[in-house]
Image: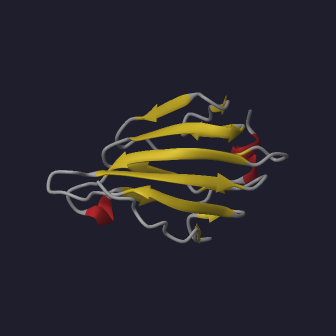
Amino acid sequence: MHIEPKQPTVKNPPEQFTGDVYLDAIASPKEDGQTMTVAKVRFLPGARTAWHSHAKGQTLHVTEGVALMGTRDGGVIEVLPGQTVYTPAGEEHWHGATPTDYMEHLAMLDLAADPATTTTWLEHVTDAQYAAR
């Protein structure tokens, strides 16, 4: 057993995010057969991901603030601290903060056989899609 060194906080790229979004890596595979990654992600008010999907699905656990999460059918849900949302493999979605409050969640997902295909990034979420609640 050992304590992992803390990785620096990184700002997520504008190609995949609208607004200011920061990530702290928590866990990554260490041994053969392990595929899970975990990160703490903080969204400033109004910040959100672009549309995307995950090869093996994704679990998000909101720790602070109120999350907005949207799907291609136009639905947008509010997720409160302590609530967990699972998005199945291949489902296109987005998530972010409300316009007035920041949000923090834990993001948990398994890497694909080719890690570069774990997340498929798509176009940015429009203001109208973001506001559709």
Q: Is residue 119 above or below residue 94?
A: below
Residue pushed farthest right?
100
Residue pushed farthest left?
32
Residue at point 26% right, 54% down?
112
Q: Does residue 31 appear in the picture of this structure?
A: yes
Q: Is residue 41 left or right of residue 20?
A: left
Q: Nearer the viewer, residue 111 or 106?
A: 106
Q: Is residue 15 left or right of residue 29?
A: right
Residue at point 79% right, 52% down?
45
Residue 89 found in image quarter: top left
Q: Is residue 106 above or below residue 83?
A: below
Q: Nearer the viewer, residue 22 or 74?
A: 22
Q: Where is residue 1? Give x, y as percent.
A: 28, 53
Residue at point 39% right, 59% down?
3
Residue at point 56% right, 34% down?
73
Q: Where is residue 97? Give x, y as percent.
A: 71, 46
Q: Where is residue 128? Give x, y as percent.
A: 75, 47
Q: Does residue 96 appear in the picture of this structure?
A: no
